[in-house]
Amino acid sequence: MIRNNQPIEDLAVLNYHAGDTGESVIVQIVNSSNRQPQDLTDATARFRMSIVNDDSTVVATIDQPAVILEDGKIQYSWRAGDLAVPGQYQGLFVVTYDDGTIESYPRQGFIDVQVE
């Protein structure tokens, strides 16, 4: 689902079917002190997501570049194979700012992704 203009902290569970690739995830990073869009000028971003089975073994992992858009937005477009394995995933965006500072979003918890 495309999540335009939605702060990352407000995301609900993202639901997909195995093999889906057509819909991007677009989130907005908001500065926690002033609630304005985070300045991502000259930053880079990655989307990381993994699925862990019942015995805490990592079954599948994604670590791919994401696209910085304007107004604090970041986009990740699903690639073939990203959603191939059904299950409950936990994801996050990792932003590296031009001064070398690295921050993960959401700041608490993860983005929940359900693949059926």
Image (cartoon, rainbow, N blue to C red):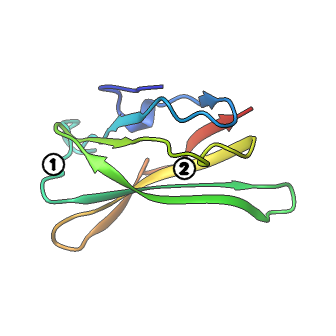
Which disc, if any, is residue 30?
none
Q: Look at the numbered disc 1 and give the secondary structure of its residue.
A: loop
Ranked by sequence position, the earlier of labels 1 and 2 is 1
Other residues around mark 1 within 10 Å, as few (<14) / some (14–19) / many (≥20): some
Residue 107 location (% of width, % of height): 42, 51
In the rendered structure, the answer to whether residue 17 lies left or right of residue 36 reads right
Relative image position of residue 46 (x, y in whole percent): 39, 58
Residue 9: x and y, percent? 43, 37
Residue at coordinates 16% horizontally, 72% vertically from top-left? 99
Q: Which quarter shows the C terminus?
A: top right
- Relative to 79, residue 1 above or below: above
Which residue sits furthest bottom? 100
- Residue at image position (18%, 51%) is 40
On the image, numbered disc 2 is attached to which residue? Answer: 91
How would you rate the neighbour count of disc 2 (Cα within 10 Å): few for under 14, some for 14-19, many for 20 or more? many
**11 or 62, which lies in front?**
62
Q: Which residue is mark 1?
A: 39
Q: Amino acid at mark 2?
A: Gly
